[in-house]
Image (tube, rainbow, N blue to C red):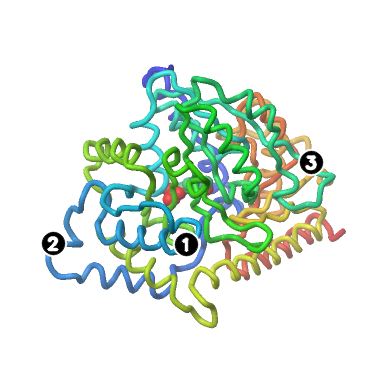
């Protein structure tokens, strides 16, 4: 286990986000790097916050319960129970739900309260870069198992990114305390299928000490619902008791800055997290929780010509996915079509990166600079379209697997997506 002081030097190092967001703005690039929507939240969500502030009395503008603002816990319990696959689960708003500052802090509270020194946490690479650092901060040891990639398969994220079951089975040991799942998946857009999740459930059953944290922040960005529905691991037989499901309002309601996140799970997990939260921040902000509680109720109702806000959201993102897919394909950045989430991983093998870029000073690149990193810098500075290199989503042993990919976000206005397409064709040439 690393001591906190030995960790602090690695924590103070700039990350890929510190490098590419400033580089994009200094270069005047269309920023398809960091994953936040560049538009306002929907009117009903903004109104919910304005209304929440005006609720008379102490219920909303003062501290709430440490566990979760009660109206949010109630709205979440109703929301999950309204889903057919969740309806049989015993979700009690008082004991099965915790909220915190974004999914990120929910995850931190979970690692901090459930890991003992030396416990291992298995991450499926590519993996959202915050997980491994949090595990280390909480005294655990991150272990990695990468998804395999098969570019001869149809170019959809579910077909290209697959499990190597033998490798996964070998990676789960008696020391593995947590397996982190993320579906829909950042950065690939893969949605874990029922056969895949069932196989993982068998492994969980074989290891009584193992818990699963399932990060589902992109749960409403699902594009091929009939063939690839969103499946929560907690709903598989026997898995409720072994699973913490995490999500947040940031992506769903275009409110990443509100940082309202939650965890749903059995009392033996939630109680440990809320006992900890009591001593960390005492409680998450009440007023944004109130606004999200109200928005969750509204979101299930008809919206524009759609059956719900969620149906509209998925359709709007499906349209944006089509725009960016076409632009990337037109210049030979071969898109691997995501089934969920709002990122496209593209195979960049046909694009040449000038040698000089590899020698540029970089705030955060590993040395020698990986190809995906250099190409992302080249696109940002010269083509003026920013993308994120996926190498920070891999541990050093597997980082070579990132070299021919770039991650592009399509949670951007149509105008920005069209402008990105124009710049890509102008600099890289249409194919
Ligand atoms: N999980 C994943 C997989 C993410 O991609 C992100 C944001 N990029 C988060 C969690 C962060 O969620 P929040 O903003 O609610 O903390």
Quadrant of the snapshot with the N terminus: top left
x and y percentages locating residue 312 in the rendered image: 54, 73
> Quick check: marks 2 and 3 in contact, CB under 8 Å?
no
Residue on which the image places disc 2: 58
Residue on which the image places disc 3: 150
Spatial separation of the CA atoms under disc 3 and disc 1: 33 Å
Please report the residue visible at 60 percent of the width from the left and 24 percent of the height from the top: 171
SS at mark 3?
A: loop
Residue 419, compared with residue 360, is above or below; it is below
Q: Nearer the viewer, mark 2 or mark 3?
A: 3
253 with respect to 315 (left or right) = left
SS at mark 2?
A: helix
x and y percentages locating residue 263 in the rendered image: 38, 47
Please report the residue visible at 71 percent of the width from the left and 40 percent of the height from the top: 162
Quadrant of the snapshot with the C terminus: bottom right
x and y percentages locating residue 361 in the rendered image: 62, 33
Residue 91, numbered circle: none
User: Looking at the image, which is closer to me, 223 or 137?
Assistant: 223
Q: Residues within 10 Å of mark 1 (few under 14, many from 20)?
A: few
Compare marks 3 and 1 and give the one earlier in the sequence.
Answer: 1
x and y percentages locating residue 216 in the rendered image: 50, 50
């Amino acid at each position: 286990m690393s001591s906190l002081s030995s960790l602090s030097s690695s924590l103070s190092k700039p990350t890929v986000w510190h490098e590419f967001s400033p580089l994009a703005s200094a270069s005047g690039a269309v920023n398809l790097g960091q994953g936040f929507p560049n538009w306002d939240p929907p009117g009903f969500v903004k109104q919910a916050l304005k209304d929440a502030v005006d609720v008379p009395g102490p219920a909303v503008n003062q501290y709430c319960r440490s566990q979760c603002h009660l109206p949010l816990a109630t709205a979440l319990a109703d929301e999950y129970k309204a889903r057919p696959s969740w309806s049989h689960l015993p979700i009690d708003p008082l004991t099965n739900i915790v909220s915190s500052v974004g999914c990120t802090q929910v995850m931190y509270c979970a690692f901090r309260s459930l890991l003992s020194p030396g416990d291992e946490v298995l991450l499926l690479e590519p993996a959202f870069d915050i997980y491994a650092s949090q595990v280390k901060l909480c005294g655990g040891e991150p272990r990695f198992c990468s998804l395999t990639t098969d570019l001869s398969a149809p170019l959809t994220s579910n077909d290209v990114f697959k499990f190597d079951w033998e490798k996964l089975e070998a990676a789960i040991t008696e020391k593995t305390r947590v397996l982190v799942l993320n579906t829909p998946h950042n950065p690939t857009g893969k949605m874990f299928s029922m056969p895949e999740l069932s196989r993982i459930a068998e492994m969980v059953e074989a290891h009584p000490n193992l818990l699963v944290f399932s990060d589902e922040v992109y749960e409403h960005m699902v594009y091929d619902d009939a063939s690839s529905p969103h499946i929560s691991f907690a709903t598989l037989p026997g898995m409720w008791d072994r699973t913490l499901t995490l999500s947040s309002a940031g992506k769903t309601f275009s409110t990443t800055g509100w940082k309202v996140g939650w965890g749903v799970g059995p009392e033996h997990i939630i109680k440990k997290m809320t006992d900890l939260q009591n001593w960390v921040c005492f409680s998450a902000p009440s007023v944004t929780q109130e606004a999200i509680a109200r928005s969750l109720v509204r979101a299930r109702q008809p919206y524009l010509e759609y059956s719900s806000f969620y149906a509209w959201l998925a359709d709007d993102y499906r349209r944006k996915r089509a725009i960016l897919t076409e632009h990337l394909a037109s210049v030979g950045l071969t898109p691997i079509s995501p089934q969920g989430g709002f990122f496209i991983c593209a195979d960049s093998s046909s694009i040449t990166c000038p040698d000089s870029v590899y020698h540029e000073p970089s705030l955060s690149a590993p040395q020698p600079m990986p190809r995906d990193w250099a190409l992302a810098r080249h696109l940002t500075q010269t083509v003026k379209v920013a993308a994120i290199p996926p190498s920070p989503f891999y541990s050093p042993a597997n980082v070579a697997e990132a070299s021919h990919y770039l991650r592009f976000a399509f949670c951007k206005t149509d105008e920005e997506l069209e402008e990105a397409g124009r710049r890509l064709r102008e600099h890289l040439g249409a194919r």
